[in-house]
Amino acid sequence: MADLGFEFQTILSDIARILLAFALALPIGWERRHGRRSIAFRTLPIVALAACGFALIIDTSAPADNEARARVLQGVITGIGFIGGGAIVKQGSTVKGLVTAASIWNAGAIGVAVGLGAANIAIVLSLTNLFGLWLLSMLGVHGREDDNGNSPS
């Protein structure tokens, strides 16, 4: 019978990492939903767990092949940039969704960091993103948007 690579300890470790990536991105998505953008509540945690999954795959299958790791990370970064690009909307002279797009990209970095065993970096990325969103919101820094995401007439 073929060895499918199932080891109970590894599975538990991978589950813990994926759940950590999801949990670190969830508050950012929550803020974006309750801030001015509804796209990110489910999107950010899923981006983080998917990026974590890709990092786990490359970390397990080619831990010493830096070239393969770089190619996978380039693909993940590009793909997440594409998803974030979909959050950006231009309406007349106003561009909306840039902060959400940046947060989506950051969620990908959180997932990759957790997947590659750098949870400390992922925690700092999550907290810094969340703190920045809250602080700028409290200071009323919304670019040219009001509290409802509308541009002034």
Image (cartoon, rainbow, N blue to C red):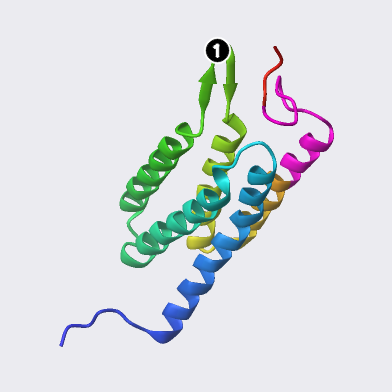
Q: Is residue 116 visible?
A: no
Residue 8 point in image, percent of width and height: 41, 86
Q: What's drawn in magenta, residue-wise?
A: 131-149
User: Residue visible at 31% across and 52% down?
Assistant: 68
Q: Residue at x 48, y 59 (%)?
A: 49
Q: Amino acid at mark 1?
A: Gly
Q: Quadrant of residue 59?
A: bottom left
* Left or right position of 114 against 10: right
Does residue 143 show up magenta in the picture? yes
Residue 130 position within the rendered picture, expressed as x and y whole percent measured from the top left: 70, 47
Q: Is residue 132 above or below residue 47?
A: above
Query: Picture quarter containing residue 75?
Result: top left
Q: Residue at x 41, y 61 (%)?
A: 53
Residue at 68% across / 47% down in the picture? 31
Instruction: Decide: is 59 above or below 32.
Output: below
Q: Residues within 10 Å of mark 1 (few under 14, many from 20)?
A: few
Question: How many numbered discs, if any?
Answer: 1
Q: In the rendered image, is residue 61 in sight? A: yes
Quadrant of the snapshot with the N terminus: bottom left
Nearest to the observer: residue 67 or residue 145? 145
Horizontal side of 139 relative to 41 (left or right) equals right
Residue 142 placement, left or right of 90: right
In the image, is 59 to the left or to the right of 152?
Answer: left
